[in-house]
Image: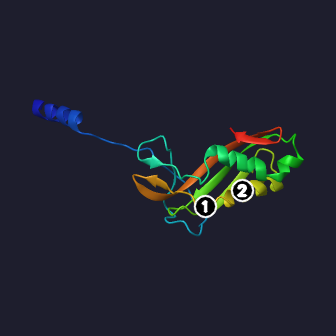
């Protein structure tokens, strides 16, 4: 019995067990262009071995472009809301799906923001353990005094 306990202690101390937090997206509909319908990930770039998909513009330039191109806000400078943009990027960097949601639903505003994201072109795909994967990316925004900023 002592030998078994010593062996278990030895194995417990010397075994290197690694776990990785990985979140997957439940795809409720088939999206054309997804590399692996069963493995669409939400990546966390701050975790080891996970790299977010990279937008062709850095965050500051993206905000500038949104504030420049979204005409609705120029015509409605008192508009105020919070929202998000979900971007589905496949393993080759192609943007497949964009969903825009705001607390105060506004189709004109949402369509203009979607157009800006669609105009960005190819992204650098997300990576999991060094392998390019399909991923969903979330951008949270707030609009105050007709200007978009990150939330």
Q: Quadrant of the N terminus?
A: top left
Front residue (pair 34, 79): 79
The numbered mark, 1 or 2, whose residue comes first in the sequence reads: 1
Q: Is residue 65 above or below residue 37?
A: above
Counting from the top left corner in percent of width and height, residue 22 is at: 46, 48
Q: Quadrant of the C terminus?
A: top right
Q: Label 2, secondary structure: give it.
A: helix
Front residue (pair 97, 148): 148
Q: Is residue 151 above or below residue 43?
A: above
Q: Pick out the residue farthest to the bottom.
A: 32
Counting from the top left corner in percent of width and height, residue 118 is at: 68, 60
Residue drawn at x 82%, y 40% as measured from the top left: 80
Numbered mark located on residue 148 in the image: none
Mark 1–mark 2 distance (CA, rounded to whole Å): 25 Å
Residue drawn at x 48%, y 58% as measured from the top left: 133
| Left or right of 40, for residue 149 | right
Residue drawn at x 17%, y 33% as measured from the top left: 10
Dot 1: within a 10 Å radius of its alpha carbon, few (fewer than 14), some, or many (20 or more) residues? few
Closer to us: mark 1 or mark 2? 2
Numbered mark located on residue 28 in the image: 1
Q: How is the image coloured?
A: rainbow
| Left or right of 65, for residue 80 | right
Counting from the top left corner in percent of width and height, residue 142 is at: 74, 40
Q: Are marks 1 and 2 in contact (CB under 8 Å)?
A: no
Residue drawn at x 87%, y 40% as measured from the top left: 78
Dot 2: within a 10 Å radius of its alpha carbon, few (fewer than 14), some, or many (20 or more) residues? some
Q: Which residue is mark 2?
A: 116
| Left or right of 88, for residue 4 | left
Q: Label 1, secondary structure: give it.
A: loop
């Amino acid at each position: 019995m002592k030998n078994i306990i010593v062996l278990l202690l030895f194995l417990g101390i010397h075994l290197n067990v690694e776990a990785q937090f990985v979140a997957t997206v439940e795809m409720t509909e088939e999206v054309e262009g997804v590399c692996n319908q069963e493995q669409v990930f939400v990546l966390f770039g701050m975790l080891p071995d996970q790299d977010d998909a990279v937008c062709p513009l850095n965050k500051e330039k993206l905000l500038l472009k949104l504030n420049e191109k979204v005409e609705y806000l120029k015509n409605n400078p008192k508009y105020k809301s919070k929202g998000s943009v979900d971007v589905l990027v496949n393993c080759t960097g192609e943007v497949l799906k964009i969903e825009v949601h705001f607390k105060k639903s506004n189709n004109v505003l949402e369509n203009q923001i979607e157009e800006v994201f669609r105009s960005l072109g190819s992204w650098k795909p997300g990576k999991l353990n060094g392998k390019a994967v399909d991923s969903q990316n979330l951008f949270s925004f707030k609009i105050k005094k007709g200007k978009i900023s990150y939330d």
